[in-house]
Image (spheres, rainbow, N blue to C red):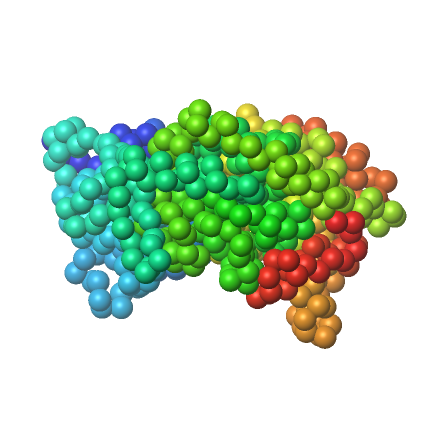
Amino acid sequence: MNITGAHALLKMMESAGISQVFGYPGGCIMPLYDALPDSPIQHYLCRHEQACALAADGYARASGNIGVAIATSGPGATNLITGVANAAMDSVPMLVITGQVPAPLIGTDAFQEVDVLGMTFGITKHSYIVTRSEDILRTVGEAISLAQSGRPGPVWIDISKDALLGTVKSSSVQTASFEIPALEESSQGITSFHSSRPVALKYHDDGNEKTESQLDLIQQVKQVIGRSRRPLLYSGGGVSIGKALGEYRNFREITGIPSVETLNGLGNAGHDSVGNLGLVGMHGSRAANTAVDECDLLIAVGARFDDRATGELDSFAANATIIHFDIDPSEHNKLKRAELFLSGQLKHNLTALSDSSLAQLDVSVWRNRCLSLHRQHGFRAMKSRKKINGPDVLARLNLCSTGAIVSCDVGQHQMWVAQYLDFERPEKHLSSGGLGTMGYGLPAAIGAQVRFPENTVISVCGDGSFMMNIQELATLKRYDLPVKIIVLDNAHLGMVRQQQNLFYQQRYSETDLDDNPCFSDIARAFGIAGKTIEDSSSVESGLNWLLAERGPALLHIVIERDSGVWPMVPPGAPNTHMLEGNCDV
């Protein structure tokens, strides 16, 4: 007995434990949609393909499992690209499946044909084109493994319509097995950077890289840490991506070393963790940026020295020795030269370092200095007077949303979320870090809510970003997903306007959104509960109303136009050169 390539694809996904996917049908992917009713895999119909990819991204970030996005050829595939690039920038595991025109028509400019393979190499870990039914099983299994092994990322499979319609021997499906091994080398010669043991590299004065034995280098790392007087942990998204949160927290507790976090590393230290100074970089606290400037040892864990975190690169931790933990050897000295680089899995490297020898580390004077910095220069929002200011909303939300998964769009509100919300785990904070994708918040919240239907999921949106995927209110209503949406409406593109105010002589070009609709009216038009508040006295009751609603709900909060994100490091400046505005920092 034979089955179609489409049925075989779904069977392989089932064997990999995939149970929920996001997609939008069309001509060349129709054979897969024809097979879906025969599969236990649950499909969620988003209302735009970009939202399919962003929902798969949110699903993967919140759960640590692979997210799946499906679309048809041509515009279906091109609409996915932004969401897939977003996942690639933040190392999010994703399987992307698109239909392609029948193999004989490839290259003929057939209806809805685009060169998906050529377009996606730069935004994926790998891309495939499959034109034979018999290649589907192997390719899907390999793609799922590749997406999750080593440094995770999106893998794209473009499958011709005739391959989906063709037949595969049922015996092949029954004997196909799925594993998530370390991919040493695939049948197409693809090597992943995955190591089950710690690997360390030392860089000598001549700049040459020298590999030494694992035990010797682990011992050297311990010695460097032991000699330091002002060590600082600088952690990023790699901690959660590498499933090393427990090991990271154990290392931090054993050593007592203070810490700062990147945007995607928020939550690594845990909720209200003593000694954690929070967000570092362009909109980080003065406390965090000062600690980086004063430290004599910077231990980078799953962070890639992104420009938004470092500011002017030469000035970042200029007085410190650097030890860099990362699974991907391509990060070796890519931006900042490290004395020691440890590749391989974070959890194994951190475990190897977390023994009693470092428990004797005396950093009490430095730790007290960091605690003092945090008390003096941590984030403190000004209370709203009559008009509502954004930081106050987020500070109040922080008091009533403990344990919630929070997604956000991109803009001022994204930075306020990072500054004023405490996260017990990094998976509870869903934010577009590397790509900065407006419109990310609502689809990502949908993905997280699908994966965790019993959890409170909150999407914090700006008025500009929310309009970019507002159609996904229909997805919320269709599946009755109880996502709680906060739209902070200052009637302009706030982050762009802030920079125009500071650096472009207040020439406010194309940032005015005075013609915004009433967003609560729009929510109600979709059959979703909605409320608008405009006075500071209504913030607390508005948030309570939102979180008490049983189904999806939207709270439209009109905030003052000139609420800024402070402090702020001007682009290209050192992190110590911080501008401070209309809030007490």
The residue depicted at 61 percent of the width and 42 percent of the height is: 278
Percent coordinates x, y for residue 508 in the rendering: 71, 71
Q: Is residue 404 visible?
A: no
Percent coordinates x, y for residue 403 in the rendering: 60, 29
Residue furthest right in the image: 386
Left or right for 571, reference 106: right
Percent coordinates x, y for residue 230 in the rendering: 56, 43
Left or right for 94, reference 316: left
520 or 298: which is nearer to us?
298
The residue depicted at 36 percent of the width and 36 percent of the height is: 219
The residue depicted at 50 percent of the width and 28 percent of the height is: 360
485 or 72: which is nearer to us?
485
Percent coordinates x, y for residue 407 in the rendering: 57, 42
The residue depicted at 79 percent of the width and 55 percent of the height is: 582
Q: Is residue 561 above or below residue 199?
A: below
Left or right for 111, reference 305: left
Q: Is residue 534 above or below residue 361?
A: below
